[in-house]
Amino acid sequence: MRDQLTFRRAFPWLVGLLLIQSAGAATANPTLTPHTAEYKIRISVLGGKLRTRFDATEDGYRAESSIEATGMSKLIAQGAIRESSIFSATAAGLRPQHYQSSDTLSKGGQTVDLQFDWDAGEVSGIIDGADFRAGLDGIVHDRVSLQYGLMHDLLNGIERTNYALQDAEKFKPLSITNIGTRSVQVPFGRFEALGIQHQATNSSRITTLWCVEELGFLPVVIEQHRKGKLRLRAELIEYKPGN
């Protein structure tokens, strides 16, 4: 049961992480491009796969992901975690509009549906059947748009030191740290990658994304440490540009 909870808590950092390449010389700034991708994941004794899809829409972007256990891990962790986010680009960065998630993988998994009303300055929706409402101060991300926002900023040469996350009913200020570059080997290839860490205030969990500039700062490795110990490692095994 403990592994299932760890599986759940680690994956939100994984969900919606993938960005790659600029849309072309016709745009003023580098933008996100449609793609699908897949990671293999190891958390403690559990193995799984994260599959993501990113699309451009008429008004912005849509990202979705699914996480499932694989192999013998299915005997311990059954079901899936599915998340999606609709968001748009503004002068201040990416801004979420609608976030949904459904977790049938973990014990006590949540169902979340949130709407971000920037004109009214509030986020509202339903969490496990109960109404939820909170104020918005500056750009606040959901669990999917947060990661796309981070990669989008790097793609455009912007390095922020702080982000804000609405994680279901919890508001979490996050600190961001650039830890430099190193060579990484994954099933998809060998790359020189930039390490970007994020950590919530008063949390012992530190997540590191190893992002590749030549791939538009796509994270090819994701690691999570808790109290100094490695709890999670994910490696890119497949990437396909386009729909």
Image (tube, rainbow, N blue to C red):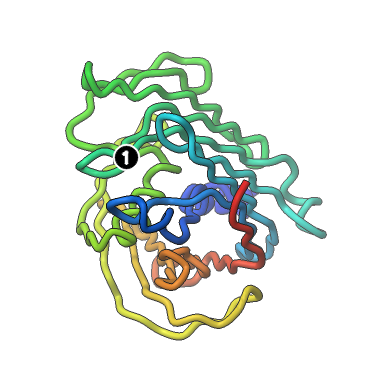
x and y percent of residue 135 in the render?
23, 24
Circle 1 crowding by C-alpha within 10 Å: few under 14, some 14–19, many from 20: some
Q: Residue furthest front?
A: 26
Residue linked to disc 1? 89
Locate residue 149 relative to residue 93 in the image: left or right. Answer: right
Nearer to me, 122 or 231:
122
Residue at position x 30%, y 20% in the image: 117
Figure quadrant of residue 131: top left
Residue 147 to residue 157: above or below: above
Q: Secondary structure at mark 1?
A: strand
Q: Amino acid at mark 1?
A: Ala
Nearer to me, 157 or 164:
157
Residue at position x 50%, y 80% in the image: 191
Residue 10 to residue 117: above or below: below
x and y percent of residue 243 in the render?
62, 46
Residue at position x 58%, y 35% in the image: 109
Nearer to me, 144 or 104:
144
